[in-house]
Amino acid sequence: MTEIAVDFPKNFKKALGDGQLRRNLRAAMDTLGLRRRTLFSDPELFEQLRARGDAIRQRALRQLPELLERLEQKCTENGIQVHWAETPADANAVFLEIIQRHHATRVIKGKSMVSEEVHLNHFLHERGIEALETDLGEYIIQLEHETPSHIIVPAIHKNRDQIAKLFHEKIPNTPYTEVVEELNAIARQVLREKFFAGEIGVSGVNFAVAETGTLCLVENEGNGRMCTTAPPVHIAIMGIEKVVERLEDVPPLLRLLTGSATGQLITTYFNMISSPRKPGEKDGPKEVHLILLDNGRSKIWADPELRHTLKCIRCGTCLNHCPVYTRLGGHAYGYVYPGPIGSILTPQIEGLKNAGAMATASTFCGACEEVCPVKIPITDILRRLRTESYDKDETPNSVKEHGYKSNATENMTWKGWAFSNATPWINAVSAKLLGLVGPQLPKLPAVGIVKQWSQSRALPSFATKSLHVLAKEKGIADE
Amino acid sequence: MSDARANILARLRAAARPVVGDTEPDAPPVPELSQADKIAQLKQRMETMHAEVIVTDRRQWLATLKEVLRKRQLNGLLYGPQTAVGAALAADWDSDLPPLVGYEQSVEDCKERLFSIDAGITSTQGGLADVGALILWPTADEPRLMSLAPPLHIAVLEADKIHESLASAMRRERWAEGMPTNALLISGPSKTADIELVLTFGVHGPKELVVLVLDG
């Protein structure tokens, strides 16, 4: 991912001040939330379903190394070529090798967050290979040289006027139109020629079934099917956590995914790929490749608490329900995965120094956990990341760059606080002092840290008498 | 890349794993339905997703198909001559209907035709009542692009092959024992909501899906 530290306060301020962005987002997030609630209208059934989903994902993760080997074995038997990649660079090297071996220049892509994670498009572009996004939302943002602002609806930050202008300016001979159907037809026209001519198709994977060596893809537009059917070569990339044990594990997860993402009972297409074209078959790729990407996941997996991060099925519903995301959109977070899931996943992959601030972009309201279809304890993990940001003690499972916020002043303050609370006479004196000084604080000029803190908060009012004193006065024994 | 494999697996193997029981909560049950109810549910669900679902007597289906075709201006109908559906078409075709075009060569030799023909007809492996979807297992005789490249996809579904749910279809037909090259669920014409969440039909796949449910 990006190596530059992200300036969160600046990004946040910019996003919050963008009225157009906030209107676009608000409308979309409310609609997605409503659709989801309509589909999962029975809370008992939903609880039952997500308990099932959670159990399936936990079972899969528990056996992760075995399932990956089994997936590799089944895929290989089926004729799918499996590649392992520890880092984004490894994964990109595999892509490049296959593309160059076929002397290909026309790569067509279905939507894949993992391909964003490894910055595949940028990597190929630098080597003179154009990778064209074919999902409508991805196509729109690629024209604008942007990254997705949402896991499921990547161009949701844009409205039709902005897209109309973009198409008119960037696609030759395109009249200006704000009619959504016409915009869609323009994209269809352009991309149909690309599907026809594509030499390499790239896709992600929603679930990979170890039992049968099957790659499952969920989509509505048909571009995913095009990318995995029309070109002679298909390369799929997935994070190692995407494997499930059995084929029968798929139906509950599929329902949870489509219902949580867009409130759909099922998408238009559910595409299950188990092999390349067999002898006698007339279409489908002659070569299918699967890239298994680690990129920090095996480290996350080693920690029993953090491991829950890997249960995620990328439905994006935590974004739609997050009071922070719904006001900022995805770009302000500065990384590929935004919102609550991004805020727990990204710091673990990228390290706390650059991405740790994402864990502070939360109100701890817990809405994300309430809607999560696989019950990821998002707030616990956020709290863990915040704690680790200050914790210098090294353990085998410490998050990368833990303790980066640790500083002498704060450490001293907390040590002092702990000491004063453990020493009754100091506690009594300091409580009394605060009782005297505290009420005067709001009258003092707000400077430095107090100014920063009180910008959006009211200062608490101090009681003139501490609880200890009050209790004593009432004759209650408090020791 | 073999190093990558060894390193990833070694890291995963090094970590401690929790010991847990074998009991897992079940998914909510899907009620069993009569065939009539399964047809009704599939029809209602698929129509919500803008598919046109026509329930027809199995002895009348060809006449129903011809009506569907006569209502439209089509430059041809892509079909699989070696399938049961294909044989029925070839045996009784009328000159005022769009010409039948067989998918008989590899895609490399007929790509242009596949991407310019107006309609394709396929059989189906079955249907799903609970979500309203077709199951397709494309074959050498009925390849994958037939249900994807033409703007109109017509699917023939035998009513007794409609299952309550995906889970029951997988169980009853023992999918886990052998998956085809490609298996598909299709719930309607292709669609998108990527611009302002406005639902628009007809993106990269078919713009129209017509399902003929053969009953009786």
Image: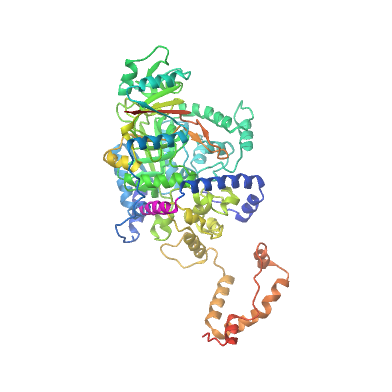
Q: Which residues are magenta?
A: A42-55
In this rendering, is residue A210 above or below A359? Answer: above
- Return the x and y of residue A391 as percentages of the image width and height: 50, 67
Question: Whole-percent x and y of residue B52?
Answer: 44, 29
Residues A170 and A5: in front is: A170
Q: How many discs appear? A: 0
The colour scheme used here is rainbow
Q: What residue appears at the point 30 percent right and 40 percent down from the top-left corner? A: A76
Q: Is residue A130 visible?
A: no
Q: Position of residue A54 (x, y in %)?
A: 39, 54
Q: Which of the two residues, B84 or B50, is positioned nearer the viewer here?
A: B50
Of residues A364 and B17, the one nearer the viewer is A364
Q: Quadrant of residue A158?
A: top right
**In terms of image quadrants, where is residue A466?**
bottom right
| Magenta part, dominant SS | helix
Q: Is residue B17 above or below residue A283?
A: below
Up the image or down, B93 lies above or below A423; here it is above
| In this picture, residue B56 sits left or right of residue A441 | left
Q: State left or right for residue B105 relative to residue A259.
A: left
Q: Is residue A376 left or right of residue A145?
A: left
The magenta stretch spans residue A320:
no
At a point 52% along the width and 42% down the height, the residue shown is A153
Q: Return the x and y of residue A162 as percentages of the image width and height.
A: 63, 37
Which residue is pictured at 44% across the width and 53% down the height? Answer: A43
Residue at the outermost bottom position: A475
Judging depth in this view, the residue of A326 and A75 nearest the camera is A326
The answer to whether residue A196 shows anywhere in this view is: yes
Residue A47 among magenta residues? yes
* Picture quadrant of residue B188: top left
